[in-house]
């Protein structure tokens, strides 16, 4: 909940300034190191290690805290198609900080052209997606399949963009097709609190706690492509339960 009045503005201003002071030098340092270490096999593993420290630093500079809740069945070294709700840039940071094992994110292509930061995403084997160019969907699915085959989890935000009202909107089918084609389990994740820290239409940052709630993995072996509608509904409802958010 946003702190009202001058006290809230002062706290948000201080947290925003703190993040700005940390973010630029930390991104240059960690991003540059990730690019240099990308030559070490297996590709991207060093990036994950560095990304965790970078994200934890951003969260700490913002006065943010992450609480992790795990339900039974999560095997921390197994590769999953991870699906989470998306309400804030800070839910991305929380996932970078606490998602177990090796992981790769699916992220919008515009991030990959940012000097140093974007280069480190390329070097780490993260997967760019252009939401306006659906013709490359199969290429993205194939790349995600390669990452899964290599033992990494792949994180999707199946809503496609940050929610403006806090509710969970319709899930796109792409992540589910990746899971079904590769026989990969789906790990539903509910994130709460990130929207209070920094909602979609606010630039300032408010310190607070973010909860990342890992659900029980959903095995896809018994599902066929024709069952994807049922699977989408099941996972969407589970993400809503885990996050405490309403379905749109």
Image (cartoon, helix red, strand yellow):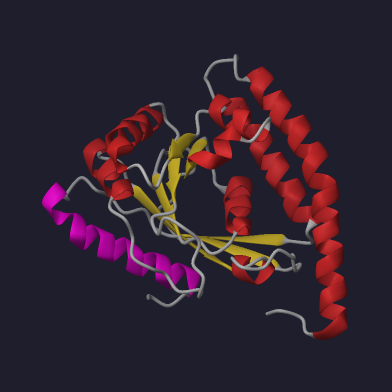
Is 37 placed above or below 182 here? above
Q: Nearer the viewer, residue 162 or 154?
A: 162
Query: Residue 10: x and y, percent?
Result: 88, 73
Which image quadrant for residue 204?
bottom right
Q: Residue at x 58, y 52 (%)?
A: 92
What span is colored magenta in the figure? 224-244
Q: Residue at x 46, y 37 (%)?
A: 128
Whether residue 244 can be seen here: yes
Is 133 placed above or below 160 here? above
Query: Residue 47: x and y, percent?
Result: 61, 30
Which image quadrant for residue 50?
top right
Query: Residue 85: x and y, percent?
Result: 46, 61
Query: Residue 63: x and y, percent?
Result: 79, 61
Whether residue 224 can be seen here: no
> Magenta-highlighted stretch: main secondary structure?
helix
* Residue 130 located within the stretch drawn in magenta: no
Q: Is residue 62 left or right of residue 34?
A: right
Quarter of the figure with the N terminus: bottom right
How many labels were placed on the picture?
0
Q: Is residue 15 left or right of residue 169?
A: right
Which image quadrant for residue 65?
bottom right
Quarter of the figure with the C terminus: bottom left
Farthest residue in the front direction? 132
* Residue 235 located within the stretch drawn in magenta: yes
């Amino acid at each position: 909940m946003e702190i009202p009045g001058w006290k809230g503005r002062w706290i948000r201003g201080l947290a925003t300034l703190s993040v700005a002071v940390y973010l630029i030098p930390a991104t240059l340092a960690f991003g540059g190191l990730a690019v240099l270490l990308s030559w070490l096999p297996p590709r991207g593993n060093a990036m994950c290690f560095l990304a965790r420290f970078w994200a934890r630093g951003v969260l700490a500079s913002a006065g943010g805290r992450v609480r992790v809740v795990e339900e039974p069945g999560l095997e921390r070294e197994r590769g999953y198609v991870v699906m989470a709700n998306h309400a804030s840039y800070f839910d991305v940071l929380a996932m970078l900080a606490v998602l177990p094992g090796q992981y790769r994110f699916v992220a919008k292509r515009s991030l990959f052209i940012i000097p140093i930061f974007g280069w480190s995403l390329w070097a780490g084997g993260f997967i760019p997606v252009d939401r306006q160019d659906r013709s490359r969907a199969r290429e993205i699915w194939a790349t995600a399949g390669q990452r899964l085959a290599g033992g990494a989890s792949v994180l999707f935000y199946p809503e496609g963009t940050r929610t403006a009202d806090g509710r969970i909107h319709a899930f796109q089918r792409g992540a589910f097709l990746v899971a079904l084609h590769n026989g990969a389990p789906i790990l539903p994740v509910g994130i709460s609190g990130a929207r209070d820290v920094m909602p979609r239409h606010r630039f300032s940052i408010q310190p607070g706690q973010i909860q990342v709630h890992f659900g029980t993995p959903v095995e896809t072996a018994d599902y066929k492509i024709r069952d994807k509608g049922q699977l989408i509904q099941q996972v969407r409802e589970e993400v809503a339960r885990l996050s405490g958010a309403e379905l749109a």
